[in-house]
Image: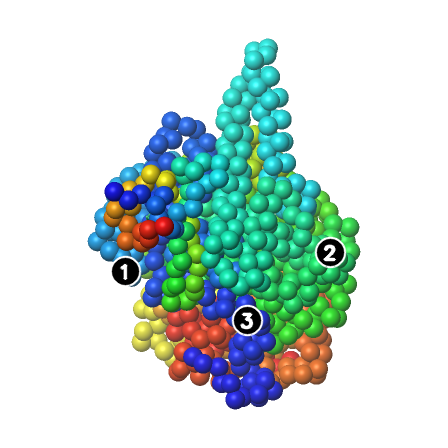
Amino acid sequence: MPKCEECRKFFSLEEDPKKGDCVQRVVDPRQAYYKAKPVTAEKDAAKCESFEKK
Amino acid sequence: MAEPAQVSLKELEKKQEWWWIAERKRSKRLDYLRKAVWKKGALGGNYAPGIKVDLELPTLFTQAWDFWRFDPIMLRRAKTNSNVLDNITIFITDHAQIMGYMGSAPHTITWRLDGASMVNEELYNEPGIMPEPQEESLKKIAEFNAYWGGQTAIDKLARVLDPEDAVKFLSGAIGWGAPTSAYGYSGKNYEYFMTGKRGFEDIIAEIDASIEKAEDRTIGLPGPDILPLYDRIQNWIAMKTALQASIRWAKRFARLARIIAENFETDPKRKKELLRIAETCERVPAKPPRNLQESLQYDHFIQILARFEAHEGAWPSRPDYYHGPYYDKDVNVEKSITKEEALDLVGEFMIRAYEVGGFAPRWAREGLQGITGTWVWTLGGVKQDGSDACNDLTIAFLQAARLVRVANPTFAFRWHPKVKDEVMREIFECIRHGLGYPSMRNDPILINNAMHWHGHPLEEARTWVHQACMSPNPTTKHGFQPMRMASATANCAKIVEYALHNGYDYVVNMQMGPKTGDARKFTDFEQLFRAWVRQMEWIFSLLVRTVNLGRYKDPEFFGRPFLSGISERAVESGLDAVSYVGERGNCWITAFTYVENADALAAVKKLVFDDKKYTMDQLITALEANWDGYEEMRLDFVRNAPKWGNDDDYVDNIMIRCLEECARFSKEIKCPCGNNWPILPENVSGNIHYANIVGALPNGRRLGDALYDGGVSPGPGLDKNGPTAVLKSCGKIDHIGHGRAFLLNQRLSPSQLAGEKGYQLWRAYMKTWADLGNDHVQFNMVSDATLRAAQKDPEKFSEVIVRVAGYSAHFVDISRKTQDNIIQRTVQGI
Ligand code: SF4
């Protein structure tokens, strides 16, 4: 079962590698941006459509 | 719609197509950011395609709110908001340099689900804004609504309101709004947190010292004096929690900026910018700003953080005054950034405010067509020592406004005799470019007004900013007002309507006001006027009672830990900033649809009692029939009764008499601080909202007709004697003693005011305006031809901006009725 920590979009926190951010690029009809959402390294990535193996 | 590239700037200027000129003149960055905005203002009442309600925030909020249910309310809210700030998706838009938005994506509007169950139910039924998959979103919203039903701030307040007051208020006939911080707008204590003396870490240190002192006492000698400290310690902890979460949230942007710079960005220039963003967000709000970017970022973070806590329907601020010293340091002294780079920051600062939007119920969307709140930023004015406060940043804001051309925020300029010509020219350019702003405010008059009505000391009064569209509010410890609700907004045309119908409302079919007598039997004008006074007192009393109670109970029903954490008196006392303790008081009644009273009363006096052309019985019969079958008579009342705004003492004296009665009563009704409730006639776009709620009136108006647009503006097309006559009528009002402020809309001719000659004409007009002691005026300077063309081809003219009332909007975003109402306003040749 893949986990977030195996994903290219996961960026761990220096002070606590078990936690981190999922950082993704989004291009909507008006603008392009990067977004970040806190996730844990252990989070199940099996159902994540954006998962990209590191 | 593409820009007509082959057309020269000169040609565009001649055609007054300023929006194309702006596109050519602004930087690539500003152009990208301006076009990147998802417009959140409702288009004539409906949200634009693509706008979705954010469900991430309510999910995080509700989970934590439930989890912390055993905490006192302020602490509960602080911990709940911390959960949101720590976990909500954040984003950084390409080219952006200023960070912070309340939703999890740029196209989302936030939902304040702890405000009112009624609003929550409305959201459930709002078409088009549900995120996909819709069914899942609706299910989620239904669950939230079930959870929050009965425990929103308004649900709690409704349980303690007098039932009769509640029914009459909720009828929607006499006022609007919701008396809770959830939907209010807070003045800010800028003199505490925005002067460069402290950042959040410094405030936390002050709070820690207070907690320590209080804890020493709570383990000391028992007595009644230590009992309030237990609650206050909890409040201080709440404030500290809110400030700490804010610092963490800002640092999340710093981290994201670094991740982008180090892992994704290939352009070295953007990389450098991202690292500067990171440095900025690590610095503020934790520590005081050191440069313009940090200062603007600090301010923007605070505005957004306040909106994470409450809806905040307005944006009281004074950006040139508080950020001016940093502009001067960076651009003039250290030359660390160029003027152009500063302009980019200033323009983006405006765009960041423009993109803000939360879900609003339909009545609010109709009342504020095209925008999401009245973001009226204050420029100019005087410093606390009375000297001119304008600076280079004042000019930069006026220039940036013409480049980004946003409809929100707008500016209101505190004019005084020492304002330099170069600033006045920049103001005129904004007006000439059809922005409809800045509105002009008479600073000496309004400072005196603040001292007269609320007893603000001179130096405090001089710090004033617009709390919403119009009302001055100081930014000091005791002067700032932390909660103001639009619910002290009176639909004043009802005063004369009720006076004519014995207090009965034929539109909502209810006995609303007191029974002041059958007007058919009135034998002289004084009887009618006495009835008018009693109805006015009744409407104002009901609204003020409701709002006072809302304010009094707000710390118990809502709680504002973040706002308290940036308010000196709350940090010092440990009380919620919304508590009235320690505040001087700065309330006002917004008087919508006011001028109809003067015109209606004058018409009755003239045609019934003086000329005896009609009897009261005939008039009431015609009004009850909504003038149906009485067209000739109606036209007589329109054409042959004197109308306000023509320097005609007959009707002007009635206007003044009405205002004198309001001013007298304003001193009898008191706010929770014990201070007065002066009136402030203006309309936002309530003149359209109330069109179907106000019945037929003796000025010839029928149910459904748009009401007059201003606070003291003459009825559209009814000012026949030119602009000076309008100013003279308005100048008969005592702009200090009769009320808090008086909104005047004027339309000027763009072709007449072209070039240097046009500027000089406008200056002469402004001199007359000031000499007559008026406190406000704002201008539309877009030709009928352009407005009509925009009605025909909205896409081509999508960037045309007009002044609606106390705010501006893109012309194509307002309803046809409001558009027509603006076109009908007399274009004054000056
Ligand atoms: S894209 Fe999916 S798997 Fe990858 S970090 Fe984000 S949530 Fe985890």
Residue B99 in view of the camera: yes
Residue drawn at 48 percent across, 81 percent down: B3
Instruction: Tell me, for residue B329, which label it has, or none.
Output: 2
Nearer-the-camera pick, B666 or B190: B190
Query: Three-letter amino acid code at disc 2?
Result: Lys
Query: Mark 3: few, some, or many residues within 10 Å (few <14, many ≥20)?
Result: few
Residue B713 in view of the camera: no
Nearer-the-camera pick, B113 or B603: B113
Chain label for disc 1: B
Q: Note whether ligand 1 is within 8 Å of mark 1.
A: no
Q: Secondary structure at mark 3?
A: helix
- Where is mark 1, residue-wise? B127
Q: Note whether ligand 1 is within 8 Å of mark 3.
A: no
Residue drawn at 40 percent across, 44 percent down: A38
What x and y, as percent, mark residue B680?
55, 56
Q: Quadrant of the C terminus of chain B?
A: bottom right
Q: Secondary structure at mark 1?
A: loop
Question: In the visual, does B642 lie left or right of B337?
Answer: left
Q: Cα distance, mark 3 to mark 1? A: 36 Å
Question: In the visual, does B520 lie left or right of B199?
Answer: left
Query: Three-letter amino acid code at disc 1?
Result: Pro
Q: Quadrant of residue B27?
A: bottom right
Instruction: Tell me, for residue B169, which label it has, or none.
Output: none
Q: Quadrant of the N terminus of chain B?
A: bottom left
